[in-house]
């Protein structure tokens, strides 16, 4: 995988550092760094009893830590995106991609997963559903003035309303709910639910479990169908199921071949070989007893179709 060669696997120390940077960035970008510094007693805001006598190190209006600016190494700045924010976000993004590239491979030893009540039928519809839900949430947040609050926090300029194109230009304007706005959000959320409904399927066998009355051969074909369905979302798990069904089919055919060998040996007068083969098939401790019983049951039920209930 190319990403594994480009992005190094993160160590425990780097993960701890990334966690610290993420917490620091969340606090710092929200404007709480100055409050924490003042309340903990590490520093105080600049206050002047006279023009020549000033105490403290945090100027008024400065709320976040940034790279030192100027010859006086001032680290307190305005609440806006700066070089430090870009550097921290780039470091966190690198760590996140590294974790994804070096993620452990699930089911690598062929361990069967438990059946899930809700399974993915179409990953494409799921992606479209998440995209529609994301657009609906963004539109709702914009109409409720959340984007205006974020713009005020970043730029420092007081803005209200919703962002959009008004009178031929893009910007914020006072918003009032209307019938078209409710219709737009209803359509987006409804389309998102429709996409999830198309992309997911409920395993009715778990909700309404019924006894498995299929014979040996029917279970094999059922396993192959399950493998084909599973390969739509997870190729490795589907391949394990297909291999398991194929192995059972080969073992059943092996039992039939052993029966042919026993019959041929008996026809040639080799009673010992015929008896050993027959004992291996019919004795409850025989190696091929399970496969032979499954084949016998399947052949016995061949052509017997249960009556369908109305």
Image (spheres, rainbow, N blue to C red):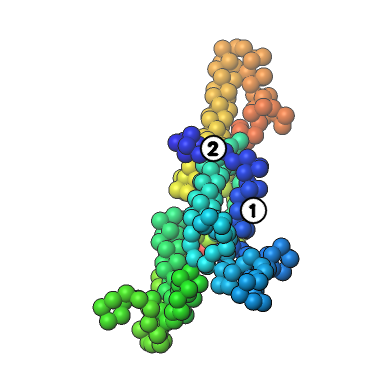
Q: Whole-percent x and y of residue 10?
A: 59, 41
Q: Is 263 above or below relative to 51?
A: above
- Whether residue 219 is visible here, answered yes or no, is no
Q: Whole-percent x and y of residue 88?
A: 54, 53
SS assignment at label 1:
helix
Q: Compare marks 1 and 2 and give the one earlier in the sequence.
A: 2
Q: Residue at left 66%, top 48%?
A: 16
Nearer to us in this view, 225 or 46: 46
Q: Residue at left 67%, top 77%?
A: 49
- Res 133 → quadrant: bottom left
Q: Which residue is mark 2?
A: 8
- Res 281 → quadrant: top right
Q: How many marks?
A: 2
Q: Is 274 above or below relative to 12?
A: above
Q: Which residue is mark 1?
A: 20
Q: Whole-percent x and y of residue 306?
A: 52, 54
Q: Is 194 above or below relative to 10?
A: below
Q: Residue at left 52%, top 67%?
A: 78
Nearer to us in this view, 8 or 79: 79
The mark found on residue 46 in the picture is: none
In this rendering, the label closer to the viewer, 1 or 2: 1
Q: Whole-percent x and y of residue 74?
A: 57, 59
- Whether residue 63 is visible here, answered yes or no, is yes
Q: Residue furthest top?
A: 269
Q: Residue at left 35%, top 84%?
A: 180
């Amino acid at each position: 995988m190319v990403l594994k060669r480009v992005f190094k696997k993160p160590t425990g120390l780097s993960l701890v550092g990334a966690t610290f940077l993420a917490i620091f960035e969340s606090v710092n970008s929200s404007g709480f760094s100055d409050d924490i510094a003042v309340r903990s007693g590490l520093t105080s805001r600049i206050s002047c009893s006279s023009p020549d006598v000033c105490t403290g190190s945090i100027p008024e209006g400065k709320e976040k830590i940034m790279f030192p600016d100027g010859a006086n190494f001032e680290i307190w700045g305005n609440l806006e995106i700066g070089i430090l924010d870009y550097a921290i976000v780039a470091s966190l993004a690198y760590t996140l991609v590294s974790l994804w590239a070096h993620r452990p491979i699930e089911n690598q030893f062929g361990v069967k997963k438990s059946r899930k009540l809700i399974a993915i039928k179409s990953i494409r519809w799921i992606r479209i559903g998440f995209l529609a839900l994301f657009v609906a949430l963004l539109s709702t947040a914009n109409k409720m003035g959340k984007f205006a609050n974020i713009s005020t926090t970043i730029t420092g300029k007081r803005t209200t309303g919703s962002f959009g194109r008004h009178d031929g230009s893009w910007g914020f304007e006072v918003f009032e709910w209307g019938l078209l706005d409710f219709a737009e959000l209803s359509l987006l959320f409804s389309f998102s639910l429709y996409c999830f409904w198309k992309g997911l399927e409920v395993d009715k066998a778990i909700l309404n479990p019924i006894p498995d009355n299929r014979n040996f051969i029917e279970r094999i074909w059922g396993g192959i169908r399950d493998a084909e369905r599973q390969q739509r979302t997870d190729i490795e798990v589907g391949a394990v199921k297909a291999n398991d069904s194929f192995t059972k089919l080969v073992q059943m055919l092996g039992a039939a071949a052993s029966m042919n060998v026993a019959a041929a040996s008996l026809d040639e007068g080799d009673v010992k070989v015929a008896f050993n083969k027959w004992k291996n098939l019919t004795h409850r401790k025989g190696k091929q007893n399970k496969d032979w019983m499954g084949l016998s049951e399947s052949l016995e039920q061949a052509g017997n179709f249960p009556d369908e209930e109305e």
